[in-house]
Image (cartoon, rainbow, N blue to C red):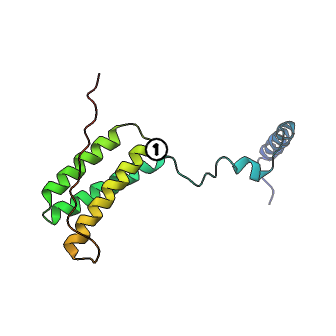
Amino acid sequence: MASNYPHRAIRAHDSFCRLARTVSLFRQTHPSRMLGPLMDTNPSPAEELPALYHAILDGVADLERRGHRREAAAARSAATAAYSRSWDDRGRRQLVAIQRRIERVVAAEAGSPGAGGEPSIRVERSAPAR
């Protein structure tokens, strides 16, 4: 089908040719080399901490629904303190520990074997701001 605007087709073809010439000026690398640094399998704490913190808040809500308000308050306070400090591996480990403690409290209530007693959730205080 012929176009009513043949000048548009010519302009598009010229733009493509210019683009092809420009692209050939740059060094081409193999796609696997370009994706190497981008395909990091270990997420950084900055990528992982928000999801972990939200999972803890969901666990806190679950504890509150089950009537464990003291444990929920302690977990929320500890998670907020860990989340508000530097986002590093130490903070990630603290959040993972809080999440595990919440899971143990829920498992102990459910009567899961090997759950042990109800663990208390320890609140770590951050240093005062200067």
Compared with 129, 40 (above or below) is below
Q: Is residue 4 visible?
A: no
Where residue 23 sits, quadrant-wise, is top right
Q: Is residue 83 visible?
A: yes
Where residue 99 sits, quadrant-wise, is bottom left
Along the line of sight, the residue nearer the viewer: 18 or 45: 45
Which amino acid type corresponds to the residue marked 1 in the rendered image? Ala
Counting from the top left corner in percent of width and height, residue 9 is at: 80, 47
Q: Is residue 47 left or right of residue 85?
A: right
Counting from the top left corner in percent of width and height, residue 73 is at: 18, 51
Crowding at label 1, few (<14), some or many (≥20) Cα neighbours within 10 Å? few
Query: Number of labelled discs?
Result: 1
- Residue positioned 40% across, 50% down in the render: 93
| Quadrant placement of the C terminus | top left
Q: Is residue 44 left or right of residue 75?
A: right
Q: Is residue 20 left or right of residue 37?
A: right
- Residue positioned 12% across, 63% down in the render: 67
- Residue positioned 79% across, 44% down in the render: 12
Q: Is residue 118 left or right of residue 7?
A: left
Local secondary structure at mark 1:
helix
Counting from the top left corner in percent of width and height, residue 124 is at: 26, 42
Q: Please, which residue is most extreme toward the top here? A: 130
| Quadrant placement of the N terminus | bottom right
Counting from the top left corner in percent of width and height, residue 80 is at: 28, 44
Residue behind mark 1? 46
